[in-house]
Amino acid sequence: MRQPTQRLEFGDFQTPYPLALSICERLRADGLSPDVIIEPSCGLGSFVLAAAKTFGAAKSIIAADINENYLECLRRDLDAAAPAAGQRVLLQHRDYFQTNWGVELEQRVGRVLVIGNFPWVTSSTQGRINGTNLPLKSNFLKMTGIDAITGKSNFDISEWMLIDVMGWLAGREATLAMLCKSAVARKIIAHAEHQGLPLAAASLTRINAMRHFGAAVDACLLFMKFSAAAPYAYDYTVYYDLASTSGNRMGSRMGMAVSDIPSFDAHADLIGASPVRWRSGVKHDAVQIMELVEAEGASFNIRGDRVDIEDTYLYPMLKGTSLNNGRVCDTNRYMIVPQRLVGEATDVIEGRAPKTWAYLLQHGQELDQRKSSIYKSNPRFSVFGVGEYTFKPWKIALSALHKTLSFQIVGPCNGKPVVFDDTVYFVGFDVEADAREAYDYLNSPRVINCLRSLLFWDDKRPIKAHVLNRVDWSKLNSRVLEKAEV
């Protein structure tokens, strides 16, 4: 068996046989009858064994894996459990990323089923452990600028593999049935729509990943049916479990992923090009240095070291958890914000606040080693996510990480504007009355229901700025719009 680091590198979560069998039986009950079955990363072979038992009419089952020991175990299991079926199974020792699967598929005739469970690991995790089980490095999601630099181009290895599979299935009578993270499954269907792939039907069926894999992740069975002759269909049903026969309809509308199509259609008039722009909080990647806690009349950094600096660059702060819990009236947390604009010179701090400058110099080496490349070409001790909007006295804010829409009004604290970390989205105002009018609008049932139809609560960051920015604020008093931070 693989060591822990190897298991992480290969995303090695072996599918239990009972789950694989239940999936195959559900596919057969839904009318699936493949001629060729391919499991391109079969591991110990639960899906191979289940498919051999379930789909007796399949002419061939191709099972491939990079691990020879796994293939040998599978060979023994086939001999013991299904010797007759084993004659239809072709075991292949091969690396998925070094295989031309399109050529392999050209040699097969009939209806194809690709089934299995690709690695549950991201490209950034591979980089952290120096793993090599990934495709050639490329920005295959075509991210640009700051998105590519700050991590939005990070992807699950399974995402790359599933897009690859769709490429060699398109144009054939074929079906894909793959276990994966639910967020990945939605991206795959969106990619199929964006590329205009011949998708005849699709669905997601929720899987209890903690029960089956001991993994705290929202997972599903992604089902996609391809047929060049069929009309394309990119809306899909999400089933509660393998026994469900009805579920929630999802898809895309107006270029956006939609989690509840009926609800979105009922509130689509609220979507527009809003002039109000939601911002994220300050990004500094140095919480133990840049964030302080006040206790018993003294200030300490997160490490517990006492800190004696001026309040010139010190601002009261709130984190997403406090906002989500409604704790906005007071705070004992503070953040050092050394700039008012991105790229602003920081050496002026030495003259304006010498104690603060000395503190930053004391931790300079650690701040200089912040990994993101966005810090490399900017003044020393730079932060991001700052602008005039950061210092507006009144704000409407909410946590991006929590699974609730909890808008909060945040006013000044001790005469200074409150700032947030980068897990928070907010809009700034100069006048309290304007903030409260906007707050009432955002908390109206129609706006809340519209937003909920665009949010996916199983995402790591379920609330996203681009979703908030699509709500049209034109129905607000024009004076509020003029004075909101746009």
Image (tube, helix red, strand yellow):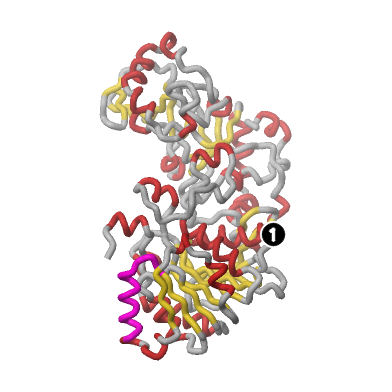
In the rendered image, the quadrant that contains the N terminus is bottom left
Q: Is residue 246 in the magenta section?
A: no
Q: Which residue is disc 1 drawn over?
A: 266
Q: Is residue 97 above or below residue 434?
A: below
Quarter holding residue 337: top left
Q: Main secondary structure of the magenta part?
A: helix
Residue kind at label 1, given as amino acid type: Ala
User: How many residues crowd around disc 1 within 10 Å: few (fewer than 14), some, or many (20 or more)?
Assistant: few
Q: Nearer the viewer, residue 380 or 376?
A: 376
Residue depicted at 48% across the width and 89% down the height: 56
Residue depicted at 59% across the width and 60% down the height: 259
Instruction: Please indicate, yes or no, whether residue 78 appears anywhere in the rendered image.
Output: yes
233 displayed left or right of 310: right
Q: Where is residue 19 drawn, in percent x and y?
A: 40, 76
Q: Start and end of the magenta stretch?
A: 65-79
Instruction: Please indicate, yes or no, whether residue 206 appears anywhere in the rendered image.
Output: no
Q: Is residue 83 above or below residue 150?
A: below
